[in-house]
Amino acid sequence: MARHKEFEINEVLDKAMYLFWSQGYEKTSMQELVDTMGIHRRSIYDTFGDKHALFIQALQRYQLLQSQRLQHLLEQQVPVTDIIRIFLETTVDNQALPKGCLMVNSGVELGTLDPEVSALVEGAYTHTEQCLLDLLVAGQGSGEIQADLDAELLAHYFMNAWLGLRTTVKTAVDQQKLTDIIDTTLRILNK
């Protein structure tokens, strides 16, 4: 007779995700995962597989949650430039979450060593950049953003700025510096 799982999968997966996000893949031990997730080692293996498989699922969960957050932001009925500002500011204002970005951290830690992680990170970046491109094109269509600016190049630019912020926020203690970076980044859209 199969045992009934006594935990909610996404709840324990989120705990693993936050641990990986805080410490990275290599520095996270199986015992720390057991302790943090609050389930038995055997349950982790039976439900998620080994540490690497759990990490991949945590990355996928992170991407899903980030995509939902981004989609919610894109659905706001505010000017496009405000949406882009909020998009950048949420990177800085993530007080309750680990610093930085699990995708960026994972790409830096494992991107050249692990093709599966590299593909997930690249897919996440591509998705985010496409959302930015769609947003910029909509802004050009509404007249909020200059039509003569190359929307694809702007999407690359804002993606790079966002990734830079997600890295800088890990060590920056000067919040004004981060705000100044955002303000300067957004000046490219000034008419």
Image: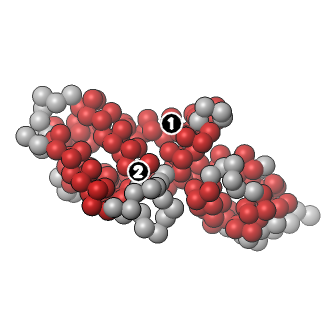
Residue 48 makes an appearance in the image: yes
Determine whether label 1 and label 2 are within 8 Å by CB: no
Quadrant of the rendered image containing residue 178: bottom left
| Residue in the picture at 70% in, 68% down | 36
In this view, the residue farthest toward the right is 1
Question: Which of the two labelled residues, at mark 1 and mark 2, occupies the earlier sequence position?
Answer: 1
State the mark number for residue 123.
1
Residue placed farthest to the left in the image?
191
Q: Where 75 sits versus 137, above or below?
A: below
Frontmost residue, 109 versus 51: 109
Q: Quick check: 32 above or below 163?
A: below
Q: Specify the quadrant of the image occupied by residue 11.
A: bottom right
Numbered circles on residues, count: 2
Q: Residue at x 57, y 53 (%)?
A: 61
**Image point 66% across, 34% down: which residue?**
114
Residue 53 percent across, percent down from the top left: 72, 46
Q: Is residue 85 visible?
A: no
Residue 55 at x, y = what percent?
A: 67, 49
Q: Residue type at mark 1?
A: Gly
Amino acid under label 2? Thr
Element carrying mark 1: helix
The residue where tag 2 is placed is: 168
Question: Residue 117: where, in percent of width, then height?
Answer: 61, 38
Q: Marks 1/2: CA distance?
A: 22 Å
**Label 2 neighbourhood size at 10 Å, few (<14), some (14-19), many (20+)?**
some
